[in-house]
Image (cartoon, coloured by chain):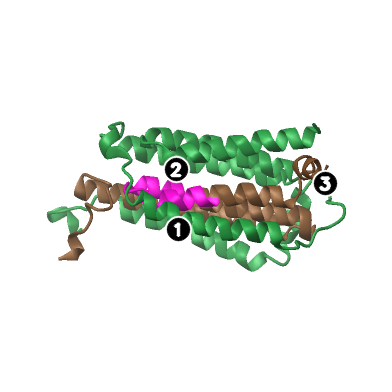
Chain colours: A brown, B green
Amino acid sequence: MIMDGLLLDIGLRHFLSVSLIVFVLGLYCVLTRKNAIGILLGVELILNSANINYIAFSYFSSGNYDGQVFAIFVIMLAAAEAVIGLAIVLGIYQNFSSIDIEAVDSLQG
Amino acid sequence: MPLEALVFYLLAALTVGSALIVALSHNLVYSAFALLGTFMGVAGLYALLAADFVAVIQVMLYIGGILVLILFAVMLTHRIADVDVSNRTVGRIPAALILGVVGTVMGVCIGAAEWVQHAEPVVEPTTFGIGEAFLGPYILPFELASVVLLVALIGAVVVSRKELRGPMADG
């Protein structure tokens, strides 16, 4: 009975769990990828998981619009981050003909 | 099964399944396209949480903007469909260990913490409230955001433009 209620009565914890899984996958992506664009994909996953948390708390806990406003700011900053990140990636590609982050070590001496 | 639970589990499956492909696929093109599923699933979750405006913003900005930009970058860097070079991974076992610990700790926190919850979540159109919040308590961050976007715009142009060499460079 308790299990039934837990599975069918969608609450805050369900959304936090989805957000946790997306966050862990995004972090895995960032930690293991050697491709710069792959790392950017991981960062997008992490930002999305943070946004799920903001919206979930806004709905279940605070009941006002602060969480949604923060989510919109996060989305805006994610757009700016993607633009700058991809511009840098394309610049690296023009100079090194590769976006493998281990190929870009000319500063290592 | 109640409709809300059914919709939630469908959206969660879409989100998590696509995120799995993003994180684990050996081909960068598949990863980039799987991000579409994650963004759509997250937009659906926002709609389920009565955040209609944020859901639409998510579709417009993430899917219409960021995803197209990422796909452009994927297509512009060649040899990308080649499995060996496109999406290699390193250090999978240490990463899995770290994430196992981090995920377990956070999962225990989610389960154990006594979250403050309202008895009755409000469901109403959100655009009016968000507009009031932006032009009231959040007016300063709102204006700063436009500066950030301008800086990002100019920065992207400066970073990605081709440098002029030779006599034209001075004038």
Instruction: Give the secondary structure at mark 3.
Output: loop
Q: Position of residue A20 (x, y in %)?
A: 59, 52
Where are the magenta residues, as a range? A23-44
Residue A34, disc: none
Circle 3 or circle 1, nearest the eye: 1
Question: Of residues A88 and B112, which is closer to you in this image?
Answer: B112
Q: Position of residue B59 (x, y in %)?
A: 59, 39
Per the model, the C-alpha gap separating discs 2 and 1 is 15 Å
Which quadrant holds residue B81? Answer: top left
Kindly identify which residue carries mark 2: B23
Look at label 1 and name its amino acid: Ile
Q: Earlier in the sequence, mark 3 or mark 1?
A: 1
Q: Position of residue B39 (x, y in %)?
A: 56, 40
Residue B170: name its quadrant: bottom left
Around disc 1, counting alpha carbons within 10 Å, would you say few (fewer than 14), some (14 to 19), or many (20 or more)?
Answer: some
Residue B69 visible in the shown view: no
User: For this rendering, which residue is in front, B33 or A74?
Assistant: B33
Question: Residue B123, which numbered label?
Answer: 3
Q: CA distance from mark 3 to mark 2?
A: 34 Å
Q: CA distance from mark 3 to mark 1?
A: 39 Å
> Please, what is the three-letter code of the amino acid marked with disc 2?
Ala
SS majority, magenta: helix
Residue B154 in view (yes/no): yes
Q: Chain of mark 1?
A: B
